[in-house]
Image (tube, rainbow, N blue to C red):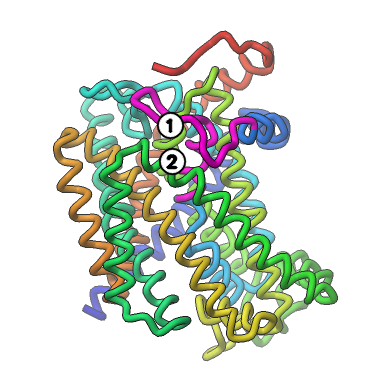
Amino acid sequence: MEKLSQIISSVSGFVWNNLLLYLLVGTGLIFSLRTKFVQVRKFGTGLRIAFGSFSLNGKKADRHGMSSFQALATSIAAQVGTGNIVGCATALYAGGPGAIFWMWLSAFLGMATIYGEAVLAQIYKTKDKDGHVTGGPIYYIKARFPNRFGHFLAGFFAIAIIFALGFAGNMVQANSISDSFYTAFGVPRWIVGVCIAIVAAFIFLGGVKRLASVTEKLVPVMAVIYVAGCLLILIIQHAHIIEAFRSIFVGAFNPSAVLGGAVGIGIREAMRFGVARGLFSNEAGMGSTPHAHALAKVNRPQDQGMIAMQGVFFDSFVVLTLTALVILTSGQLQSGVKGALEGSALAQASFCVTFGSFGNVFIAICMLFFAFSTILGWYFFGEVNVKALFGSKATKVYAAIVVACIIIGSLLKIDVVWNLSDLFNGLMVFPNLVALLFLSGTVAKAVRDYDKNPDNSTEDTSL
């Protein structure tokens, strides 16, 4: 099993670090240029549209879709996960403080990519056999390639996302929750796993209506708790904030000036780990969040594209940045030093510097919110593809398998599951990127149309 895990890890590392890193950044650059940097020009507009429909108890989702804020909340629920804590800590350890700069850059470009994903999801959304609105990469892949090649790409994507997020991914998230609660409170892992599974099953059975209702409440609450905790630490550690930012900008281009030449971390490592972890966290270009954005009831596809950008911004420029600053101001980071703290241990130690033993409790609570919200989002993304492949009756079987994966994942910490999740995450990106690049002209035209007539609100994309 250990040897199998190493093989899968090596393949996954090659896919992410040597192929996807460049493809995702390149796609983001292409979309940025073709949309004339829509992430800058329309950021404020997207912010106003997104939070104009903000409510902790908004209109219930139905077969015609959900509100734009509910779609954004479902998207953020999937984006903001354990990677925002553990992934950030890993990037800092392996790539040094400069990795955060490259995280920011990849997120900036990723905002244009996710704009394109959301616009295409809206343009090509449809209704399933039961009359419910649905959409996502499989639909715009088939629309662009209405032949055997397109059906193969769509099928490959659907199977990859079901395994990557619905099964293996949710095992990873459940494991993160059970581990953090065992460390903080000594609660047996099986009890945590069963409790998570029961609550998750209740939400799954309620369909998209219950999912949207939960995420629109859960996301704002988890955001407030985590952001408030980080800000409190940074207020206490304010004397180290300027130095933290200096280490980020200097370390991005001259890591040895921050870490010393003996550590062995150069610009290549800072770029690689910063970009890879950033893209893995905000999911721009991966093809997951379009499933939620397709269901939004908006006047024009461009509206949801501008709203989708807010999810990447919040994930990378708010949550990841705050995590990085907490770690950098704590004095616990020893980048590249063998045997030093890394991953979740580094994150926990950094919060404990200010919060004492409560740091472990705080991380456990945040892990619960982050990982559980991701379970909900990833379940939904997988369900859309299960319906497309096997029909709505198969969703009950899918839900049962996901619940079983949650329980098993909370009990076992098997490296092969983590590595399989990373690998399938990488594999599902390829068909999505192919479709995005071939449909970039459609997105560019949508941007031009909006620029010519930004006040037009007569076009209704609801089905």
- Residue nearest the observer in this picture, 8 or 289: 289
Residue denoted by label 1? 60
Residue 207 percent across, percent down from the top left? 30, 39
Label located before the other in sequence (1 or 2): 1
Please give the name of the residue rendered at 50% of the width and 13% of the height, measured from the top-left corner: 460
Would you say residue 183 is visible in this rendering? yes
Q: Which residue is drawn at 28% across and 71% down?
A: 416
User: Is 321 in front, or is 100?
Assistant: 321
> Horizontal and vertical percent for residue 124?
39, 22
Residue 438 visible somewhere in the drawing: no
Residue 143 falls in image quadrant = top left
In the picture provided, is 80 more to the left or to the right than 384?
A: right
Which mark identifies residue 280?
none
**Number of the label disc, if any, that sits on residue 213:** 2
Q: Are there few (<14), some (14-19), or many (20+) residues within 10 Å of tag 1? A: some
Q: What stretch is highlighted in magenta?
A: 52-77
Graded by Cα atoms within 10 Å as few (under 14), some (14 to 19) or many (20 or more), the crowding at tag 2 reads many
Q: Is residue 335 left or right of residue 183?
A: right
Name the spot of residue 432 as percent of width and height, x first: 39, 39
Looking at the picture, which amino acid does disc 2 mark? Ser
The residue depicted at 73 percent of the width and 76 percent of the height is 329
Q: Which kind of residue does numbered mark 1 sit on?
A: Lys
The C terminus, quarter of image: top left
Query: Residue 401's spot in the image, x, y percent?
Result: 19, 55
Relative depth, front residue between 44 and 39: 44
Which residue is found at the position 55% from the left and 37% from the top? 308
Residues under numbered marks 1 and 2 in contact, where contact means CB atoms less than 8 Å apart? yes
Q: In which quarter of the image is the N terminus?
A: bottom left
Q: How far apart are marks 1 and 2 (CA)?
A: 7 Å
